[in-house]
């Protein structure tokens, strides 16, 4: 009986090891590649677009479309209507994103502020100036990158990703989309 238990335990251990020893996914050369799926914005960027890319690079790759007569802004990301790029000195510094785009932690416009706090416990609370129509914010920073979640006290109203200094500048000064 003891030999059977040993054989059974050995078989179970071998099966467990075999089921967990598959090849782990590796990070692509471009960290902004679809490592999280097509609708995920992360702190490197989104899909094949990285923060720091130039307008020229993105246009040459067919990713950035410059409108001849823009309705709101001059640049749009091809195939990503819910991503608004923000450039400074020709470099991509921020992206405004709307559903279905979301962070790797699942946060997007409409996510409750309690959920944001749970998923980003180290996020810094930012308070909008009194008497303005601006939203309060939560800045979830990692190194020189951050997510900025503008909220009404209940739910996220705007989601921005990019360089932390620019996200802070957006909140403080209204550095904008165009």
Image (tube, grey):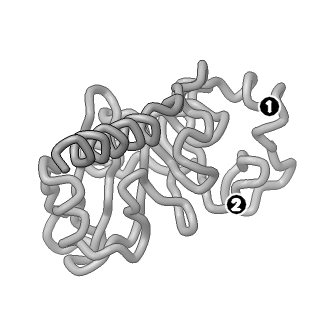
Q: Is residue 90 left or right of residue 44?
A: right
- Residue 59: mark in rendering: 1
- Residue 10 visible: yes
Q: Is residue 156 left or right of residue 64?
A: left
Q: Earlier in the sequence, mark 1 or mark 2?
A: 1
Q: CA distance from mark 1 to mark 2?
A: 16 Å
Element marked by disc 2: loop
Identified at 42% across, 46% down, the residue is 161
Q: Is residue 169 visible?
A: no
Q: Nearer the viewer, residue 107 or 66?
A: 107
Determine whether label 1 and label 2 are within 8 Å by CB.
no
Question: Which quarter of the figure has residue 61?
Answer: top right
Taking 102 as reference, is 12 above or below it?
A: above
Q: Can you name the residue that lies furthest to the front here?
A: 1
Residue displayed at 66% across by 34% down = 48
Q: Position of residue 10 (x, y in %)?
A: 30, 38
In this rendering, the answer to whether 47 lies above or below 37 is above
Question: Is disc 1 placed on a helix, strand or loop?
Answer: helix
Q: How many numbered circles does the render carry?
A: 2
> Residue 118's x, y, as percent?
17, 62
Q: Position of residue 57 (x, y in %)?
A: 73, 23
Q: Residue furthest bottom?
A: 154
The residue to which callout 2 is attached is: 81
Q: Is residue 170 left or right of residue 99?
A: left
The correct choice, above or below, for 16 with respect to 105 in the image is above
């Amino acid at each position: 009986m003891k030999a059977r238990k040993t054989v059974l335990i050995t078989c179970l251990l071998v099966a467990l090891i075999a089921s967990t020893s598959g090849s782990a996914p590796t990070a692509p050369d471009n960290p902004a590649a679809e490592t999280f799926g097509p609708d995920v914005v992360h702190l490197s960027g989104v899909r094949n677009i990285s923060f720091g890319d130039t307008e020229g690079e993105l246009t040459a790759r067919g990713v950035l479309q410059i409108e001849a007569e823009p309705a709101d802004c001059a640049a749009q990301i091809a195939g990503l209507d819910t991503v608004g790029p923000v450039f400074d000195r020709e470099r991509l510094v921020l992206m405004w994103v709307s559903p279905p785009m979301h962070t790797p932690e699942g946060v997007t416009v409409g996510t409750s502020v309690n959920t944001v706090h749970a998923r980003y416990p180290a996020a810094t609370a930012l308070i909008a100036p009194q008497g303005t129509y601006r939203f309060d914010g939560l800045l979830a920073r990692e190194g020189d990158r951050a997510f900025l979640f503008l909220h009404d006290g209940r739910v996220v109203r705007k989601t921005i990703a990019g360089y932390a200094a620019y996200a802070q500048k957006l909140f403080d000064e209204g550095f904008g989309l165009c």
